[in-house]
Image (cartoon, rainbow, N blue to C red):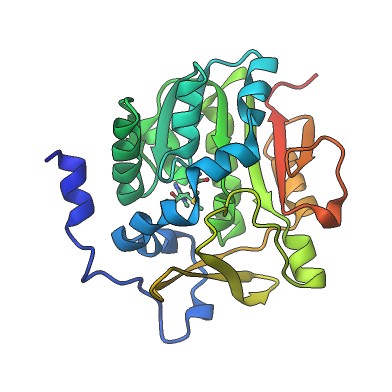
Amino acid sequence: MSHSHAVLDIDDTEQQQQYSSDPTSDRYTDLYTNEYIAAFVKKWDALIDWEARALGEGTFFIDLLNEHKKKKILDVATGTGFHSVSLIEGGFDVTSSDGSATMLARAFENAKSRGHILKTNQADWRRLGESVHERFDAIVCLGNSFSHLHDEMDRRRALAEFYAALKPDGILIIDQRNYDYMLDSGFKTKHKYYYCGDKVSAEPVHLDKNLARFEYTFPGGDKYTLNQFPLRKNYFCQLIRESGFSTIQTFGDFEEKFIEEDSDFFIHVVKKQTE
Ligand SMILES: C[S@@+](CC[C@H](N)C(=O)[O-])C[C@H]1O[C@@H](n2cnc3c(N)ncnc32)[C@H](O)[C@@H]1O
């Protein structure tokens, strides 16, 4: 059995997500390391059905990276490896990074079962430069990951680290849920992109301007939660600009022309170079 397999099997039964007695008061950036426990990570791929997700996304990211002539990619939110694997299969040179060792171990196994050996790097975004010394053509941060940062200083630090890890003409591709709609009009989803597993429900159980707490219910009744910061789109774009990035092109559910309220996700394509 490989080392990474052993890591995954250690604590399946005993470990639990750790929140305080009032989980809605837990709004700190390091929380994600307690949230992605092995049992949840194992089920994550049931939530994110790879085949359905691949159909939903098509070749969007591959086309985008090819259009921009980018080859050397850093996936900073590898999770269980969906994008790292699809980019490797699309011919890119991919380094797979994540702050969670549990996630990376799972990604490594997922890639191995598809015939790939991932180049992995465990790093929190706020300290990316401590272990990432190369410069990349593009960074991808996908799957609504950035909203794990609960504190504005952490958001700024992470964006600064992404900026530093890019070559001068590098691009950042970063996505987010449509939190504006959620905050202003309530929750709805097409369940078509990202969270495509049809046997799993993913719904917010608490929502205020500083917290979106999502509950994921799996077949058999197992429930896990994630506390995320509901990033408003204009605020996020402003932070990105203030971090030194120049043009921002935004897609809604993979479309260039989109109706804001109808989109579940926004994808921002951001350039480092000023024009
Ligand atoms: C919602 S998952 C998305 C995973 C994957 N990109 C996908 O789309 O399936 C978020 C990932 O971001 C990672 N993450 C969250 N906060 C982080 C941080 N501060 N530094 C590094 N990784 C972080 C988590 O460990 C997790 O793997």
Residue sitting at x 70%, y 57%? 190
In this picture, residue 150 sits left or right of residue 245: left
Residue 37 in the image: x percent, y percent? 33, 61
Q: In this view, does 139 lie above or below 1?
A: above
Residue 45 in the image: x percent, y percent? 42, 51
Outermost top residue: 69
50 vs 60, nearest the viewer: 50
Residue 62 in the image: x percent, y percent? 61, 24
Looking at the rendered image, the quarter that the C terminus falls into is top right
The answer to whether residue 14 is seen in the rendering is yes
Q: Is residue 159 above or below residue 133?
A: below
Residue 267 in the image: x percent, y percent? 70, 41
Image quarter of residue 80: top left
In this picture, residue 107 sits left or right of residue 258: left
Q: In this view, does 117 lie above or below 22?
A: above
The answer to whether residue 68 is seen in the rendering is no
16 vs 136, nearest the viewer: 16
35 vs 66, nearest the viewer: 66
